[in-house]
Image (cartoon, grey):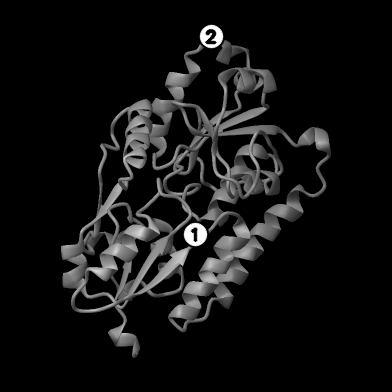
Amino acid sequence: MTESNVRIVSLIPSGTEILAALGLTDMIVGRSHECDYPPEIKNRPVCTQARLNTNAPSAEIHDKVNNLLQSALSIYQIKTDVLEQLQPTHIVTQDQCDVCAVSLGDVEKAVASLTHNSPQIISLQPNVLKDVWTDIERVSKAFNVDSVKVLENLEARVQIVKQKVQGLSLTELPKVACIEWTEPLMVASNWIPELVNLAGGQSLFSVAGQPSTQLQWETLIASNPDAVIFLPCGFDLNRTRQEAQLLTQNPEWQKLHATQSGRVYITDGNAYFNRPGPRLADSLEILAEILHPEIFEYGYKGTGWEVL
């Protein structure tokens, strides 16, 4: 297959960002409704839609997601008519989380229903940082492009952060609670604990490589973290601020060490932390800037994160 014949549909934002980092943006002919970076991707036809209102309150979104999954329905629908028109040669998707994007099963079903062609499915499976680098390499091999420079650059950025925090003593490593959802309260897992530890923090509650779990309010209060970072899945800075402020109205919140020392932060989780692609290096730099402003100043404040 020649390069000019390659037609890629990406059904997950991180996949789109990986393709773009590898110089394959021009080959992307379709995207998911959530793919919005790099900005030039926004004019591509949209191949998915959500079965729920993402502007609803957190609790309502959570209930709707659970109801759909219990009914054996997907949270997202694939527009097979659009896929049929686009005639992709490749579809990039994921089988890491059915709440984050279309499921692999749905993609396989949609592909089976296509009459004109049978695209190759490339499914990403990131749980920790190393998996993301492996996915980048796998995508590069599928399209016969070089990933060495991209991966060397990402790894170099990780190493810079790692080296700068190496000399810190244990007492200088703040205990950090990363909140991925506010109602119900959930802590961020997968690659997030790893990023926190790399950035010179001590990740509370969650285990690297494991799915996110619910957290009891009492547990959060009892652990009394030094810093609390909000990075809700799919929310930008403004929406995250609204969600976080609802939580901070609880009287017990004021007693937290993080609150009293002004170390409660909001981030753009949608652009950074929730997307297992090249911008996880940015996410690490954001965490480093938040946790150790005396060492790091990358310039993300105001766009990637803010003090609540």
Could you tell whether 165 is left or right of 301 in the image? right
The x, y position of residue 241, in whole percent, is 42, 29
Residue density around tag 1, few if under 14, some if 14–19, many if 20 or more, within 10 Å: many
Does label 1 or label 2 sit earlier along the sequence? 2
The x, y position of residue 82, in whole percent, is 18, 64
Q: What is the number of the mark on residue 20?
A: none
Q: What is the number of the mark on residue 277?
A: 1
Amino acid bearing label 2: Pro
* Residue plotted at (30% across, 45% down): 73
Query: Residue 168 lies in what quarter of the image?
Result: top right
Q: What is the number of the mark on residue 251?
A: 2
Alpha carbon separation for disc pair 1 and 2: 38 Å
Which one is in front, 119 or 280? 119
Query: Residue 115 lies in what quarter of the image?
Result: bottom left
**Residue 164 is at least partly visible in this image:** yes
The x, y position of residue 4, in whole percent, is 29, 86
